[in-house]
């Protein structure tokens, strides 16, 4: 393992993921235009191929037969000098236009006088060689700017999400006004080229905080039907900061969306820029960018930044909220398996998982908390507990919390506890489904919510795990632990 230094601490700098998607080097951020095309999954993403920082964005491209094993393909979109995307091809979507694969994305040109220093317009590109190379439309931009005549002066106009309707196309664009609130703008088109502004699909003031704060600008909106409802997902940008992602379930009357349920899509601080794909099985599969959570100079030494979340399948829950579970295809990566049944955990008992080690693991526990106050799973734990990341479920508050205060000795790594309420399942049990991949932890709870966190353990012996009860006895009705293969070891062989 390579090491850099940060103060007196040796910092591991080459902890690439084993089964989370990432490019071979440099910057990766938002997933873009995931599409299931002729039996294969295509995933595009914001990519700066020159260095591990935000820069003039390209669309990186990868293909997979199964959502799990990916082969890298050539860059799909890059800025065209003098064009409406001269300074970046920002986020967008992919659609099937009667057999023609089509990308709709935000082109940006630096302009000090314009919305947050970038003029933002919507552009289109098509492929006629099975998504390998892309031709930009000479008529670009297809939407030359934010709507005029509405009473909004937007400070963002980006990230188109397009879908087919009975007699044409519809598109939402993320927008908002700094210090005022976010907007989702709705457009319609007969042909993907000429677009009419319909109105605001949804707006919310940034002063409203309950049940969730949605900030000033909505980025990366995703809008689609699910069951008998519509779902609106977006990322929250405010005062030059990326915050969190929000999911709303509600009703669409053809012009406006009215939310009935509103909550965080992911309770962690490192998950952003969601993108949703409809696959051949009719599933809505969600991707997200998992950001770095340490200082820039370590990022430079590492040579890469950013990973893709695991694919997550969305469903509508009986309580009106959005359910999120990891895609079952991930099971193909499972290797060695250990199972415990009816494991009784009491506060003073020895750690039953003392023998288990690893930084690439899947853990699934069905817990009966009884009268206990909480149950805690520790990951990437050094033998003396100097480093460890805690995943705790608190019975009284029904909260899932990830505590990374001691995840790393690296002073450049961000700390803190994050989480929120995720009620137990209908059977009263708490099901934790945890994916550990070196510097990423994804925790899914009760089929209902999840937390994504970056951690950066520095000690080579921070590989232990433990499961503990606090304030009473917890029964682990089942506990399964698998080692997980590297996705590249299971290459699709392109
Ligand atoms: N990232 C893109 C934008 C989007 C933001 C630029 C979200 O299109 O709003 O790389 O992370």
Image (cartoon, rainbow, N blue to C red):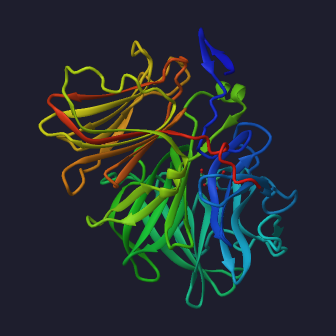
Which quarter of the rendered picture does the C terminus lie within?
A: bottom right
Taking the image as drawn, is residue 123 in sight? yes
Residue 174 or residue 13, whichever sits in front: 13
Residue 41, percent from left and from top: 64, 63
In the image, residue 382 sits, relative to residue 225, either above or below, namely above
Instruction: Let me know if residue 240 appears in the view.
Output: no
Q: Position of residue 420 (x, y in %)?
A: 31, 44
**How many discs mark residues in the rendered view?**
0
Task: Report which quarter residue 160 is drawn in.
Answer: bottom right
Residue extending furthest left? 371
320 with respect to 148 (left or right) = left
Q: Position of residue 421 (x, y in %)?
A: 28, 46
121, 39: nearer the viewer: 39
Q: Quadrant of residue 434?
A: top left
Q: Nearer the viewer, residue 307 or 176?
A: 307
Tell me residue 362's x, y (percent). 45, 41
Q: Is residue 421 left or right of residue 316?
A: left
Which residue is pictured at 66% across the width and 22% down the height?
1
In the shown orientation, is residue 187 left or right of residue 479? right
- Asked where in the image residue 393 lies, by quadrant, the reply is top left
Residue at 15% across / 34% down in the picture? 372
Of all residues shown, which one is farthest toward the top? 8
Q: Residue furthest bottom?
A: 167
Q: Is residue 490 above or below residue 226?
A: above
Please determine whether, in this image, residue 186 is positioned above or below residue 297: below
């Amino acid at each position: 393992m390579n090491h850099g230094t940060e103060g007196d601490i040796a910092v591991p700098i080459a902890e690439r993921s084993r089964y989370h998607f990432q490019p071979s080097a440099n910057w990766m951020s938002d997933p873009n235009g995931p599409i299931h095309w002729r039996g294969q999954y295509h995933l595009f993403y914001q990519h700066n191929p020159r260095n591990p920082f935000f820069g003039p964005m390209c669309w990186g491209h990868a293909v997979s037969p199964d959502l799990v094993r990916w082969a890298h393909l050539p860059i799909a979109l890059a800025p065209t000098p003098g064009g409406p995307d001269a300074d970046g091809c920002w986020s967008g979507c992919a659609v099937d236009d009667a057999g023609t694969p089509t990308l709709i994305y935000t082109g940006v040109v630096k302009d000090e006088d314009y919305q947050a220093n970038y003029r933002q317009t919507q552009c289109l590109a098509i492929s006629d060689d099975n998504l390998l190379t892309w031709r930009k439309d000479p008529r670009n931009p297809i939407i030359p700017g934010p709507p005029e005549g509405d009473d909004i002066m937007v400070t963002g106009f980006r990230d188109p999400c397009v879908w087919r309707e009975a007699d044409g196309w519809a598109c939402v664009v993320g927008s908002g006004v700094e210090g005022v609130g976010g907007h989702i703008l709705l457009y319609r088109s007969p042909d993907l080229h000429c677009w009419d502004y319909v109105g605001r699909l949804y707006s919310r003031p940034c002063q409203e905080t309950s049940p969730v704060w949605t900030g000033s600008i909505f980025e990366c909106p995703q809008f689609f039907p699910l069951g008998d409802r519509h779902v609106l997902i977006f990322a929250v940008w405010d005062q030059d900061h990326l915050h969190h992602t929000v999911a709303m379930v509600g009703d669409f009357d053809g012009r406006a969306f009215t939310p009935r349920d509103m909550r965080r899509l992911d309770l962690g601080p490192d998950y952003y820029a969601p993108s949703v794909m409809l696959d051949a099985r009719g599933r809505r599969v969600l991707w997200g960018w998992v950001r770095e959570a340490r200082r820039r100079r370590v990022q430079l030494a590492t040579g890469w930044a950013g990973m893709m979340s695991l694919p997550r399948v969305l469903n509508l829950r009986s309580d009106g909220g959005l359910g999120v579970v990891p895609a079952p295809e991930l099971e193909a990566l499972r290797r060695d398996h250990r199972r415990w049944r009816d494991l009784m955990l009491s506060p003073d008992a020895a750690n039953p998982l003392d023998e288990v080690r690893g930084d690439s693991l899947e853990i699934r526990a069905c817990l009966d908390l009884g009268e206990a106050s909480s149950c805690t799973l520790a990951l990437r734990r050094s033998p003396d507990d100097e480093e460890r990341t805690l995943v705790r479920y608190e019975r009284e508050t029904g909260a899932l919390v990830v505590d990374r205060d001691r995840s790393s000795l690296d002073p450049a790594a961000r700390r803190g506890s994050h989480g929120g309420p995720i009620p137990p399942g209908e059977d009263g049990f708490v099901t934790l489904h945890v994916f550990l991949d070196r510097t990423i932890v994804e925790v899914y709870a009760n089929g209902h919510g999840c937390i994504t966190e970056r951690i950066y353990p520095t000690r080579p012996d921070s590989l232990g795990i433990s499961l503990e009860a606090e304030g009473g006895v917890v029964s682990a009705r089942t506990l399964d632990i698998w080692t997980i293969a590297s996705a590249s070891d299971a290459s699709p062989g392109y």
